[in-house]
Image: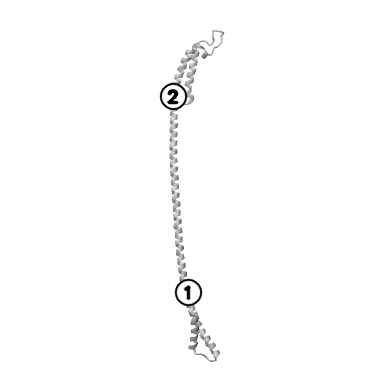
Amino acid sequence: MTKTSMTLPWTRTIALAGLMAGLSAGPLLAAEGGKPHFPPFDATTFASQLLWLVLSFGLLYYLMSKVALPRIGRILEERHDRIADDLEEASKHRAESEAAQQAYEKALNEARAKANSIAADTRNRLNADAEANRKSLEADLSAKLSTAEARIAATKAEAMTHVRGIAVDAAHSIVSTLIGTAPAAPDVEKAVDGVLSKRDAA
């Protein structure tokens, strides 16, 4: 039922009450002077006006208490229930969003910790590989250095043997030139060995 259909019986009741009051008031013209009187201000109609006022108010009160107010109450109750449901749903969505945010933060922290762990493992592995490579290079260099030193020592020893022979030949030639006769080879070698021994000792 719409608002217009609800208020229509009240309008008809009020109009009917006014009509009945006018009919019970008698003629609208006063006896004196023939001037018209407004019926609500006519003292002779106060009793009927009060009667119809009480009847109209009672009917209006009955209609309001039995028709309008229960409907308004149901509307307010439905609105209250709908608001409560909306608030409950909003609270549910809020709890779900908070749980999703906490899960996201947890996953983000786990991913960050995992990334840090992977970075630390990679750094340690690279450091270990670099250390192993360094030790391997040092070992290779030490081995090559030892080989080179041994080769240098062998070359030096071989060169020294050639130097002794060259020195013996040179001393033999010089002595032969100076004295005119060739000296004995053992004597020349003995003299060269003595000079070389003194130089090595120095």
Q: Which residue occupies 55% across, 89% down?
A: 178
Q: Tell which of 39 and 180 is nearer to you.
A: 180
| Residue placed furthest toward the bottom | 181
Q: Which residue occupies 47% across, 24% down?
A: 6
Q: Tell which of 68 and 80 is nearer to you.
A: 80
**Crowding at label 2, few (<14), some or many (≥20) Cα neighbours within 10 Å?**
few
Measuring from the top left, give residue 29's x and y in whole percent: 54, 10
Task: Answer above or below: position of 173 versus 48.
Answer: below
Measuring from the top left, give residue 169's x and y in whole percent: 52, 86
Q: Which residue occupies 44% across, 45% down?
A: 102
Measuring from the top left, give residue 40's x and y in whole percent: 51, 14
Helix, strand or loop under label 1? helix
Q: Which residue is mark 2?
A: 67
Q: Which residue is mark 1?
A: 149
Q: Tell which of 126 and 6 is nearer to you.
A: 126
Q: Which kind of residue does numbered mark 2 sit on?
A: Val
Q: CA distance from mark 2 to mark 1?
A: 120 Å
Comes first in the chain, label 2 or label 1: 2
Mark nearest the camera among 2 and 1 is: 1
Q: Which kind of residue does numbered mark 1 sit on?
A: Glu
